[in-house]
Structures are given as C-alpha cells and as structure tokens.
Image (cartoon, rainbow, N blue to C red):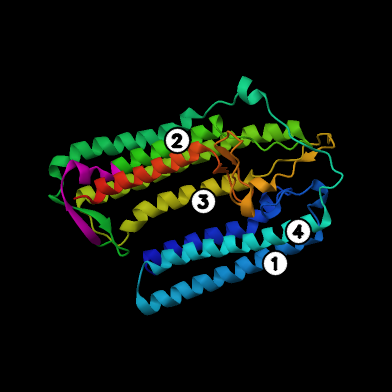
Amino acid sequence: MPVVIAVSSALSALFLVLALVLPSINSPTVPFGVRVPAQRTDDPTVLRQTRIYRSRVLVSGIVAAVIGVVIYSVTGAMWLLPLSVLVLVGLWYGCFFLANHEIRAAKAAGGWYEGLHQGIAVDTELRTDPPRFPWLWLAPALIVTVATVVIGVISYPSMPEVLAVHYGAHGVPNRLAAKSVGTAFSLVFVQVGVTALLVGIAAAIFGSSRPDIDPARPVGSARWHRQYMSLGAKALLALVAMIDVGMLGSSLLMWTGTVTAWAPLVVVVPILAGVVVAVVVLARNNRARDAGEQVTGLTHRDDDKYWPGGLFYINREDHALLVPRRFGLGWTLNLGNPRTAMLLAGVVALIALLATLRFGG
C-alpha cells in the first residue's frame, strides 16, 4: 500500500472518529453551536439531530473515502487522496450546519429562554492571579530546532551541490534546487516560523482569551477553565516539538541526499502522532466535570447572534482575541476583533516568506 494511501486513510479515520464523538464531549448547553438552557439539553429535537448528524457523517465519510480510493486507482493522481480528506471535513461541517439550523428553529419556535434568568459569570482572578504559562514545555521544540541548526551548519560544506527540496508520494525527489543558505536551511526557517506562530497562539490563550464560565456553576466552571487553558497550551507546545522533529528528519534527508520510499513518513509520522495525542488529551478534558456545586439558578445568556452558523464568532464589542469553540476542541478567533485581521495577515505573510525561501531557488 503506497504511503500516501496509508497517511490519507489515517487522517480520514481520525477526522471521522472525532466528528462522531464531538457531540458527546462538547458542552451539552451548546449542541451544534446553539446556546440552550440546561433543562433543554435532552430535548427530543437535540437528541434526534444528534442521531441524524452521526448517521450523515458516517455515511458521507465512508462514501468520500471509497470514491477517493476508486478515483485514485483509476487515475493514479496522488493529490486526490489528500483532497478526499478535505472533502470529508467539508461534509462534516455540512452535517453540522444542518443540525445547527434545526435546533435553532426548534429553540425559536418553543421559546426555550422564556421566563429564565440569564446572566454572565467572570473569573476576576484571571487578572489578579493568572495561571502560569508552561514555559518548560517549550524546551523540547527549542532543543530540536537548535539541534537542526547545529547539524545543518556542521554538514553544510559536505552537502550535495544540488538539494532535493521536495519529495513525491513514493519518496522520489520531484523538485531540486542549487545549494545555498536559503535552500539548505529552508526547513529551519519553517521550524522557527511554525514554532513562533504556535507559541504565540499558546500565549494568546493565556493573555487574550475569554473563558465561557457557566453562571449556574461559576466556581467549578472557572476552575475547569484554568486547567483546560494550561492543558491546551501544553498540548500545543508538545505538537510544536513533534512538528520540529518532522522538519529535522526532512532536513536530514535533504542534506544527505537520501532517497527512500519512506521519506514522506519521516515528516508525517511525528506530526500525525502529535496531532493524535493533542486531540485525545483535549477531547478527554473538553467538558467541565460536575463537582456537586450548588446551582445558582442562572443560565447562560442567549448569545447566538454572535455565532453565525454556530461555528464563527463575530463580536466587535468583545476585546478577546480567542474564545472557546462551541463545536470542536480548543479555541476559535473572534472575527470581530481588529487584531484577528492583523494576525491572519501575518500568517499569510509568513507562509509567503517561507515559500519564497524554500522554492525560490
């Protein structure tokens, strides 16, 4: 089985499993991105849409995978397999939007928030006694990056005059470039750029995110949010280290002129392992535990107007850069914050710079 088929199959399986289990690990008061009162979490509409969503995701996922493999076997076009993964993600979110629409309609028709006391809760200690950023977890990524630089500097004189800067699906180089500092150390630049970007995101989780504290159980909810912040940052920093390991392995292949059918796995295996571990860790801790705290009698305010489709958050009055995702793991950007546009522009500029450095030769 070609490596690309194995990798694409693994990614498809990961996304499919994640899509199927998300309704069970997300907050029950935001089913499919719709804010509902706690007493409506087991409403027949919510339960029915959850079953329908899972059926749609399972069927569409299997169909997309089969079609992708069949078309690949006929055409031999490798890019079709990664494309099938993207199609699966698109179908996943299509099923999500259908469920979101039905629950919103039932909520509006049934007046689910009528007569309820809505409120918000704030953890003031996030400013007076903020949790500590796990700087120690950044050490592995820095060590791997520094090791890559040192090995590259030492090996540069003995590197081939023509370097393979890209490998095909079978491990055969399909793009060559003359040796230069820009081409030889292009993956080091990727390491530095990716590390800086993801560390910045991890830091933003601590400094520019807003917790979604449950006003019905504010103490336990605030405690869980602090723990989840720390866990999310650690998972992200561990993923950075695994990405850097993949970049180190790919650099060694380029610097030594090694040609092997398993070349793609040198990059894919560490990154895929890091993604799987991060997803599992976050998924296991994605919902606040009920610690027996006395209920206050308040419920979350109905803020669906800031969540078009239940997936995107747009609130110009909210100064937070990141907010907890309603459907999925981790956080999402506040698209109403001007800093979001600056961040996205910076990411695009970084990608363009790295592409220029890597393929300019």
Residue at 71% in and 64% down: 51
- The residue lying toward the viewer, choosing from 334 and 84, is 334
x then y, percent, for residue 344: 44, 43
Q: Can you see residue 244?
A: yes
Location of residue 115 in the rendering, given as x and y in whole percent from the top left corner: 87, 44
Which of these two is toward me, 103 or 148? 103
Q: Tell me the mark number nearer the camera, choosing from 2 and 3.
A: 2
State which tag comes first along the sequence, 1 or 2: 1
Q: Residue 137, position in %: x, y?
A: 47, 33
Give above or below for 190 relative to 123.
Answer: below
Magenta extent: 173-188
Q: Amino acid at mark 3?
A: Val
Residue pictured at 79% horizontal, 40% vertical: 299
User: Quick check: is 108 in the magenta stretch?
Assistant: no
| Mark toward the start of the polypeptide (4 vs 1) | 4
Q: Which residue is mark 4?
A: 46
State the SS at label 3.
helix
Above or below, 3 against 126 in this view is below
- What residue is shown at x 36% (from left), y 34% (from top)? 143
Mark on residue 199? 2
Q: How much space separates mark 2 and mark 4, taking CA atoms?
A: 37 Å
Q: Amino acid at mark 4?
A: Val
Q: Secondary structure at mark 1?
A: helix
